[in-house]
Amino acid sequence: MSNQPNHSDVRGQIKDDGREARLSFRRFAEHKMKREFKEAAIKKCEDHMKNFGQCAQENGLLVVFKCRDLNRKINECMLEHNSPEKFEQYLKEHEDEVERRTLKSKD
């Protein structure tokens, strides 16, 4: 029994590992940039969202059936502008911004 780690020690280690990831300054900077990236994608898809909103108001409960194509256009637009691949590309293009925000967060 003494060879096996204590159950509470294992949980404590898992909790510490999770905390380390959450408190990382680089991860925080990337998270802020991800929010900004998503907001820009939403802005690019704003016309599709307005059309869907208008369709939803006009059709009430039938929105699921009558506005399906407009919903699909929103999803396609968001997939195009907010995909993980696009975000990785965005991070590579703005690596200096990530570093600047990381250093700013540490101060």
Image (spheres, grey):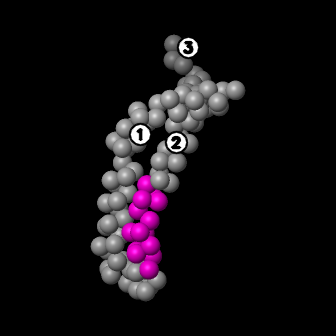
Q: Are marks 1 and 2 in contact (CB under 8 Å)?
A: yes
Q: Amino acid at mark 3?
A: Ser
Q: Residue at x 50, y 29 (%)?
A: 96
In this rendering, which labeled residue sits more in front, label 1 or label 3? 1
Q: Is residue 81 magenta?
A: no
Identify which residue, 97 or 54, lies in the foreground.
97
Image mark for residue 2? 3
Q: Earlier in the sequence, mark 1 or mark 2?
A: 2
- Secondary structure of the residue carrying tag 1 is helix
Relative to 11, residue 38 above or below: below
Using the image, determine if residue 105 lies above or below residue 39. Answer: above
Q: Nearer the viewer, residue 20 or 29?
A: 29
Q: Nearer the viewer, residue 14 or 59?
A: 59
Residue 40: horizontal and vertical position, in percent?
47, 53
Q: Which mark is residue 37?
A: none
Rounded to the nearest angstrom, the CA distance separating label 1 from label 2 is 9 Å
Q: Earlier in the sequence, mark 1 or mark 3?
A: 3
Rendered-image quadrant of the C terminus: top right
Which percent across, then down, holds residue 81? 37, 52
Instruction: Give the secondary structure at mark 2.
Output: helix
| Residue at the far right in the pictured view | 107
Question: Which segment is the magenta one?
Answer: 41-54
**Which residue, given by chain and number where applicable, does mark 2 sit on?**
33
Q: Which residue is mark 1?
A: 90
Marks 1 and 3, how far apart in space? Answer: 50 Å
Q: Could you say where residue 101 lies in the image, as x and y percent from the top left?
A: 59, 33
Q: Is residue 5 left or right of residue 67?
A: right
**Is 94 displayed left or right of 85 in the figure?**
right
* Above or below 33: residue 76: below
